[in-house]
Amino acid sequence: MLSVARIRERFAGGGGGAAVAESDVPQTALTPAAVLIPIVRRASGMTVLLTQRTAHLRDHAGQVSFPGGRCEPHDANRVDTALREAHEEVGIEPAQVEVLGCLPEYLTSTGFRVTPVVGFVNPPLNLRLDDFEVADVFEPPLEFLLDAANHQRHKLEYGGALREYWAMPWKGYYIWGATAGMLVSLYRFLCAECA
C-alpha cells in the first residue's frame, strides 16, 4: 500500500512523459484543459474525490469526472486552471491543495488536451457544489483505483468506428473514458510503488 511519503517521493522524481491519447483523437487543434486529481488524506485511508456531472451539460453530461475544465486566458498555467476549476466546481480552496505534480497530458477523442494535476487535499473539505455543473461527489479509495484488477477494458462502436476505453465501476458509479484513463495513468506512474 502506498504511503503519503512514497507518493510525494515519486512525484519529486519528476512527472510528465509522453502524452496518452484515446483512439480517434481529432487531427485538429485540441482545446487546452486541466483537471485536479484530488487525493484526500482521510484517517481511514486515502481517497480520490470525483464528481458526477449534471445531466443537462453540453459536454460529458452525467459522466463521472475530476474537477476541471478549459484553460482560460487569465490562468497562469495548467496548475492554476486545475485549482481554479476545483474551487469553482466543488469549493476546494487552492490553499488546501498540496500540488504534487502533473501526469502526462491526456488527449481526448472529444477534442481536449488535458493536463492531470495531482495533489493532496486535507479534510475538512467544506465542499460547495456548483449545482449547474455538479450533481454529486464521491470518494473511492485510492487503493481500489490503483488495483489493476479493477481496470476493465471495453469496446464500443461509435460513429462507425470501434473505440476502446477504460472503466472502473465502483459502488453504483461508472468511472470510464478519460477519467478512468487518467486513473490508469496515475496507476502506471505509481505502479512501482504498488507492488
Image: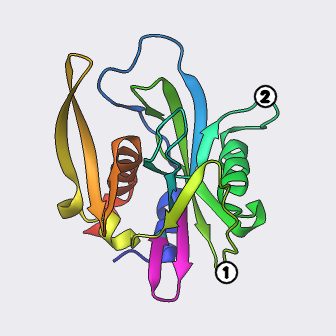
Foreground: 132 or 21? 132
Q: Give amino acid for label 2.
A: Pro
Give coordinates of residue 78: x percent, y percent. 66, 39
Task: Kindly identify the residue that appears in the image at 62 percent across and 70 percent down.
Answer: 121
**Above or below 113: residue 91:** below
The residue at the point 51 percent across, 28 percent down is 112
Residue 49, image x and y in percent?
51, 65
Q: Is residue 164 magenta?
A: no
Q: Secondary structure at mark 1?
A: loop
Assess whether mark 1 and mark 2 are in contact (beta carbons under 8 angstroms): no
What span is in magenta?
38-47
Of 185 and 87, the residue lying toward us: 87
On the rendered structure, is 42 left or right of 99? left
Of mark 2 and mark 1, the one earlier in the sequence is 2
* Separation of marks 2 and 1 at Cα, in angstroms: 31 Å
Which residue is tagged 1? 124
- On the image, the x and y values in percent for residue 109 come to 39, 25
Q: Magenta stretch containing residue 45, yes or no?
A: yes
Q: Which residue is mark 2?
A: 73
Evaluate whether residue 13 shows in this view: no
